[in-house]
Image (cartoon, rainbow, N blue to C red):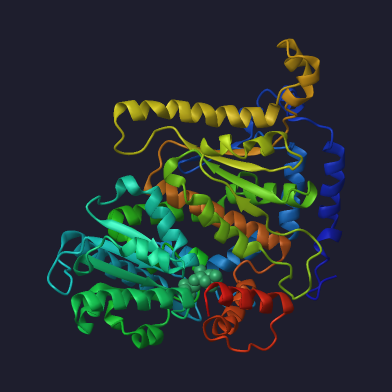
Amino acid sequence: MNADGRTRLNQTPEWTALAKHREELADTHLRELFAADPGRGEGYTLQVGDLYLDYSKHLVTDETLRLLRELAAATDVFGLRDAMFRGEKINVTENRAVLHTALRAPRDAVIEVDGENVVPKVHAVLDRMSDFADRVRSGAWTGHTGKRIKSVVNVGIGGSDLGPAMAYEVLRSFTDRALTVRFVSNVDGADLHEATRDLDPAETLFIIASKTFTTIETITNATSARTWLVEALGDESAVAKHFVALSTNAGKVAEFGIDTANMFEFWDWVGGRYSYDSAIGLSLMIAIGPDRFREMLDGFRLVDDHFRTAPAEANAPLLLGLLGIWYGNFHDAQSHAVLPYSHYLSKFTAYLQQLDMESNGKSVQRDGRPVEWQTGPVVWGTPGTNGQHAYYQLIHQGTKLIPADFIGFAEPVGELNDQLKAQHDLLMANFFAQTQALAFGKTAEEVRAEGVPEELVPHKTFQGNRPTTTILAKELTPSVLGQLIALYEHKVFVQGAVWHIDSFDQWGVELGKVLAKRVEPALTEGAEVEGLDASTRRLVAKYRELRGR
Ligand code: F6P
């Protein structure tokens, strides 16, 4: 039993039934499952908004899905879901509500935190953002010298960077191409240097994005950006027209020297990695315009509503979460690949890494006891077809089981000429070929029938049985992006709920931050730092020697 009276997850009858079922299915091949059910390719699909989900190429039967849903019921996934949507403080270690869903709630919705309806606040900030974005886009907001803003630099890290940076890439063809939009996150000075070296300070707006406004990387880069600007324009007061802040911490924003009139607020019930549809999305909104941004929010909301209301059998985030549990907990899969077949989704998987790994990279349950089961997977991947010529070999023929999501679109987006548009069929031919090859492979008999010499037959045989989800939509629009992100947000939620972990804290990033602060004086001043281990002490000395200190 756990402290809260729950039977330990891996001792529940639902878990045990899944483990037994896994053994029974051990020798079953997807080839057999498809042969036994000609309707599988149509039956094992879901349509959610614009997203068509095909889960037929998974190592599951109706029975597997039923048992997985029973696990979800036993762990009260929908109970926790409802508590989240109601604004209950389900982030137990920080005693906070988890309400990124309120960021895309309609104006007339009522969602209360501590007795206060937060929806009017959300829309007030969205309206201020829209007004500001319009003024920057139209040229009504000018810099200190009266010049129009032509470049926007978002300075932030983690959730204050990955979301807008990813979405800006995804929606590039919807952006105002006259604006240069860049993202600086790394405390490596090279990042800010490369982002600003060709910009005119008089035409540059810095957006300092930090929920806490204490993150060392962001504050350091913001300070350097301010120096760059003030030195060029020769006037400290220029900051007012060239710096705005996105934060929950008005005190720290003012302390940094940004007028809080130029601050766009969000709240502690928005987790950093769930924040890009809050004020954190301002750079994106400036790039694509408020209307497109709101279309994106509508996409998020569509999947929120689906997750909240769809029955378990047809609930896409529940299904995707449970499939991940099936592989991670019952097939020993350690990682999960996300493989978008769209160049515009080049930063999508990097974004999901924070969403998934910072949320579910936990080994302690909500009640403080250690988990006795695997939790979040390593999430990785890059856009196809590039990956096909790099690491797909391991997915096809390696010794590890790597479930993968393939995300593709029927239409190419945007401004491509006819010749480039025509390449889209080739891109998608690769997409469909890969999921087919992964699922069905190529038997030794098929290889032999091609006249391959016997000694090469084992090398050219593909075992298949590699599971994939296909997510297909007509076109990559702002709404579709919102739908995709909400789908993954809720998938991560489902898994955290089943594993009985707090998906909304991130204590694991703290120790490194504390140690970095402690080590820095050793590097700069050669200070004697207490508690340095022998390896780190030697490395610090070597570093100083190499720097000639
Ligand atoms: O890396 C830890 C973290 O706290 C993330 O969760 C967060 O998104 C990031 O740092 C940035 O934090 P902030 O927005 O407060 O600067």
**Residue in the picture at 34% in, 48% down:** 172
Q: Using the image, determine if residue 532 lies above or below residue 277.
A: below
**Residue in the picture at 74% in, 70% down:** 364
* Pick the front one: 292 or 350: 350
**Residue in the picture at 25% in, 50% down:** 177
Image position of 145 (left or right of 5): left
**Residue in the picture at 77% in, 30% down:** 29
Where is residue 267? Give x, y as percent.
45, 76
**Would you say residue 510 is visible in this rendering?**
yes
Where is residue 57? Give x, y as percent.
66, 34
Q: Using the image, determine if residue 369 lies above or below residue 198.
A: below
Image position of 512 (left or right of 27): left
Where is residue 44? Give x, y as percent.
64, 35
Where is residue 391? Give x, y as percent.
62, 40
* Pick the front one: 209 or 5: 209
**Would you say residue 94 is visible in this rendering?**
no
Q: Using the image, determine if residue 458 lies above or below residue 350.
A: above
Image position of 282 (left or right of 366): left
Query: Which of the 4 quarters of the picture holds residue 493?
Result: bottom right
Query: Which of the 4 quarters of the picture holds residue 357?
Result: bottom right
Furthest toward the left, the residue is: 146
Question: Which of the image's four quarters has the N terminus?
Answer: bottom right
